[in-house]
Image (cartoon, coloured by chain):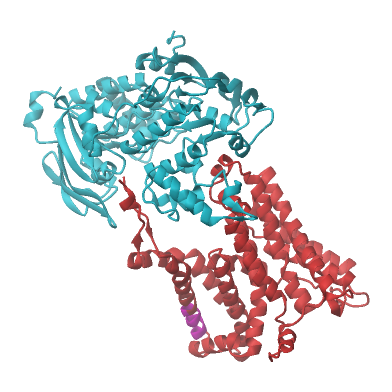
Amino acid sequence: MSTTTRQLPRWADLVLLPLLGLVAALLISAGVIALLGESPWQAMKLLVDGAFGSQESIGYSLYYATNFIFTGLAVAVAFHAGLFNIGGEGQAYIGGLGAGLVCLWCGNWPFWAVLPLAILAAAGFGAAWAFLPGWLQAKRGSHVVITTIMFNFIASALMTYLLVNVLIKPGQQSPETREFGANSWMPLANEMLTKIGINFAPTPLNLAFVLAMIALIFVWLFLWRTRWGYALRVAGQNPTAALYAGISPSGMTMLAMVLSGALAGCLGLNELMGSQHRILIDFPGGAGFVGIAVALMGRNHPVGIFLSAVLFGALYQGGSQLTFDMPHINRDMVVVIQGLVILFCGALENMFRRPLTALLGRRAERGKVES
Amino acid sequence: MTADSSAALRSPALELRGIDKRFGTVHANRAVSFVVKAGSVHGLIGENGAGKSTAMNIVYGFHRADAGEILVNGRPVQIHSPQDAIAAGIGMVHQHFMLVENFTALENIVLGVEGGPLLAKGLRRARKELEQLGRDYGLEVPLDAVTETLSVGLQQRVEILKALYRKAEILILDEPTAVLTPREVDQFFLMLRRLRDQGKTVLLVTHKLREIMAITDRVTVMRQGAVVAEVETETTSPRELAEKMVGRAVLLKVDKKPAQPGGVLLSVRNIEVRDQHGVARLKNASFDLRAGEIVGVAGVAGNGQSELLEVLSGMRQPMRGEILFGDSDLVAERLDPHQRRKLGLAHVPEDRLKVGVVAGFSAQSNLILGYQDRADFNRGVFLDDRAIAVDCERKMVDYDVRPRLPALRLSAFSGGNQQKLVIAREVDCTPKVLLVGQPTRGVDIGAIEFIHQRLVALRDAGKGVLLVSVELDEILGLADRILVMAAGEIVGELSREEATEEKIGLLMAGVKGAGA
């Protein structure tokens, strides 16, 4: 029987569909804002203006986006191996510990020596934290969704213990370490731009953004341009075919989790070395979970992840501007908007896919191929 | 062979008039019209993709036709769902049974027509009725046996009883013999004749010419969505039907010279495999495969052939035994499929889509599956996409894969072309030994011919081919030596000369020593 597979054109699948979801999410958010007694139009203007209206707001948006790129990539790499890594939050937390320890111990070394060590430590700690669930999945069959969630709690408990009892700066109340040596601080974007003669407003945007871009390219090259990435994707899409080809699905599970954890771990480079300059309680602040939405909306592809990370960064930054200027709207509104974006781009995607396919659909060549 | 004369006076049991159905641009049914006489066995034959299943799915209410009408007993009926079809007296037995495995046969049959909220009364009534049906049609089944303990043949009876219990007068059977032994097929045919003689109408959908010839009264041939012929079975021949199906002359027999077996390439000794429940799936399997021969493994599906292929290809580790290939014992060295490929042991798996390909990948990406480490596919740490595409294009030409688009998603190719891609991948690297499982499953006649020629060519080039197939015709047409498997054991070995369908059939049914 000739079955037909109607397909959306690629551009529509990658661009139009997420955009439609976004518009729908914003429309409903507008309704919520109207219910709260504020003007939706005004609110949207404030939101966009707060996110992109000035150098400062752009810098902040991209600074937040940097976190989301790392955690979004982490989710995507695991996804391509058929795994749902929900542990980005914990892996980022532990990865930050690695980066932080390097900065605490070697904070006075020259920056060019600290940076590679910090990257290695952040990635290594994050990778190790993800390896355990990966290993449990591969060898013991413990589902990675369950274990990574549990590892988030373990990470949180471990870090609280360390910060309260071990790493805390003596003689203070709040559970955080002393400040890193100034040599280990990430160069800020405005400092770097000044050097080449461009003036940019001071923001926390820093060198980690460049590292995030490199990570995007690395992930793309690895997954689609190397035999190991190929093997990982085969294992993700058809584990039996992987076995048939002599690719060990359990090996790929562990590899994917290690890479995923390493990417999530790099969040600390931006958050701690770039801005906080100390390790503090709960510094990932939910970015590990936002990464799931970023990857989902970005179709697990680096280009999409970049775009959706910028979107979420902008929502974050614009949303705080919004709560500042509109007294009836508090921070939860941003969460509502985020939630709606996730709902429409992830869960309800097929709501738009069907009519859109009917509208634009072209049939796969299958019918013509059938001889 | 036509039914009794009164049938001629009755209006046709089922008539399709101008049934038209499009799926997007695919014209799956083009003005399909045919008549199924009451009280006859009617065959519907065609290649995969010819539109048989579409037509039957329309009759049974899974799809709705864009145009045309369906008449049952001369009256137009509106069929929008299987419920409508059942109400119109149409029953369908699918190729894959729709049974709840841990229900008893009786429970399965009454499922959905229990006749009230409390089961006991309905079951009592059903039991009585089913016993009667069983006697009338020679369809006795152990009603209280749990379905999964029944043989495939009995499960099929349960499916047929299900339809009869729902008062079906017209039975549509979709590829019903795919899972049966030759002996079970004979019994099955007997049962069909009995159903017909009792006045039921049977519509047999199949691609097996032999069955059409053996059992049907009339046959409708479909090609590319249209009916191309409707003939009395008596007046036609397999060759004529095949040509009508394909639209050109085809070789039904594989053209090959006698084998010239050389030295032993692969030596299998005392292999034993158990599943996770500890049940032996493969017992003490031993045989040799020589250069320049095709060894066929015959048997009803699920009698250890799959496990044999998995063990040989390295997808599964046996409990014990040896597989000697070249200088190595593949079992003792625990070589994985990738390492075995490097030694020259290639594998075309039984289940193409589940095992042999990644459906969402492009054709070219699929052509490096298992060979992704090969130097000519890589440049440094990166895959060499250009080289891979060029290689894919060449194989597409050599193996007549259409369309010749290396970047096209694999699932967009037809079954036959997918299989040609898999064959191209595994044969083109000139392995010493090729393991092939069901090479022509779901593949149309034109492609079957081509694939068979390739396998023979590989043999003639001095390689060894182990062919596992449930199609007896395929085994008899290709193999130089035949191993028969039943219940996980190799129960007989026959040379091609001494092998007959009857001998193999007896061995398949587990009658030991029948081949001697």
Q: Residue A293: where, in percent of width, then height? A: 58, 67
Q: Nearer the viewer, residue B157 or A124?
A: A124
In the rendered view of the protein, which quadrant contains the N terminus of chain B? Answer: top left
Q: Residue furthest right?
A: A171
Q: Nearer the viewer, residue A201 or A29?
A: A201
Residue B378 forms part of the magenta stretch? no
Q: Nearer the viewer, residue B308 or B107?
A: B308
Q: Nearer the viewer, residue A40 or B486?
A: B486
**Left or right: residue B275 compared with residue A118:** left
Q: Which chain is red?
A: A
Q: Quadrant of residue A200?
A: bottom right
**Left or right: residue B16 compared with residue A182:** left
**Which segment did they paint magenta?**
A27-35
Q: Residue B55: where, in percent of width, then height? A: 24, 44
Residue A31 forms part of the magenta stretch? yes
Q: Is residue B203 in sight in this rendering?
A: no
Reply above or below: A276 against B497.
Answer: below
Q: Look at the image and give the colour of chain B.
A: cyan
Q: Quadrant of residue B120?
A: top left
